[in-house]
Image (cartoon, rainbow, N blue to C red):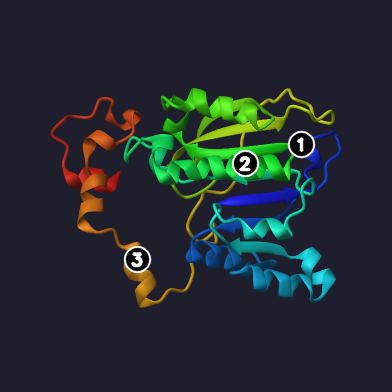
Amino acid sequence: GFSGWSHAVQAISSEVIPMKHIWTVDHDFMAVEMYTKSHANAVHLRSGQEAHELRNGDQHEYNSVCKAFQCDIRTPWFLSHVKAGSTDIITWSPPCQPWSWAHTSQGFNKNDGVVWLHALVIIAHIRPPIFLLEEVSQFAKHDQFDLVKKLIYWAGYEIISVKSINLREVIPQNRDRCIVIAVDRQSTRLNKIFTWEHWPILPPASLRVARVILPYDESTMQSMIPDPKILEMYFDRNLLPKSYDEGVPRNIHKKDLRKY
């Protein structure tokens, strides 16, 4: 996922103005389709032609909708529809497999790891004052993280926060993630001192309140079922988070892993 937000003035000054999601990019058809179903003002754009047709139509509609581009970040035709300097915050979530202990953990040595670099070059072009990067918690401990920091500095940004949080506080899923926040080093309108606040108090998360229950067909259902090899990987005790392993007997059964 790769998304742009505008009017993020709350992060830049003392004035509070609601943020507006103005565009998002994902290579996966289902990811974009789910996004457009859960966000009423989003329009699914599968090609440059569809984006041009939208832009050449009703200008009010074009400016008011969130453009959900289905696009490979390595062939960024969507940039024709995103003006440099028009985005206040970019949030991005590159492929996690290259940085995860549960997968290759080869970073930039894998093709899907290089996708991270393509995204950074695009950020340097769009030039938001702030970007927020979300990755697996292992990301900040990876042996290439020093190179990551140098590349971010090379792109003209300064990291002001690296923090690992568990998203179960806000979504119905137990998932540790690394959040990196960086700001434009050349910007004079940014307060570069950052302090984490607590998440707002929310009702207990469930699939229903998270608005992720969608209609599905047989082919979609089949794509959601992991094959036996993937299930074996998830039931490998050695790939569990270290916090789970503390004080747990070594003769744990698969049903206990499934419960976890």
Position of residue 31 relative to residue 134, above or below, is: below
Q: In this view, does 121 lie to the left or right of 89?
A: left
Name the residue at 20% across, 56% down.
228
| Of pointers 2 and 3, the one earlier in the residue sequence | 2
Whole-number angstrom distance, CA of label 1 to CA of label 3 = 39 Å
Indicate which disc residue 255 carries: none
Image location of residue 109, percent across then percent down: 39, 36
Whole-number angstrom distance, CA of label 2 to CA of label 3 = 32 Å
Name the image quarter holding residue 225. bottom left
Name the residue at 25% across, 48% down.
258
Mark 1 Cα-neighbour bin, 10 Å: few <14, some 14–19, many ≥20: some
Is label 2 or label 3 in front? 2
Indicate which disc residue 11 carries: 1
Image location of residue 103, percent across then percent down: 32, 41
Is label 2 or label 1 in front? 2
Position of residue 217 relative to residue 249, above or below, is: below
Name the image quarter holding residue 11. top right
Image location of residue 241, percent across then percent down: 33, 33
- Amino acid type at mark 2: Val
* Residue contact at pointers 1 and 3, CB within 8 angstroms: no
Is label 1 or label 3 in front? 3
Q: Tell me the residue that label 2 is attached to.
A: 121
Name the residue at 80% across, 35% down.
12
Q: Tell me the residue that label 3 is attached to.
A: 223
| Of pointers 1 and 3, the one earlier in the residue sequence | 1
* Residue contact at pointers 2 and 1, CB within 8 angstroms: no
* Residue contact at pointers 2 and 3, CB within 8 angstroms: no
- Amino acid type at mark 3: Ser
Determine whether the residue tagged by mark 3 lies in a helix, strand or loop: helix
Image location of residue 54, percent across then percent down: 73, 73
Name the residue at 39% across, 71% down.
220
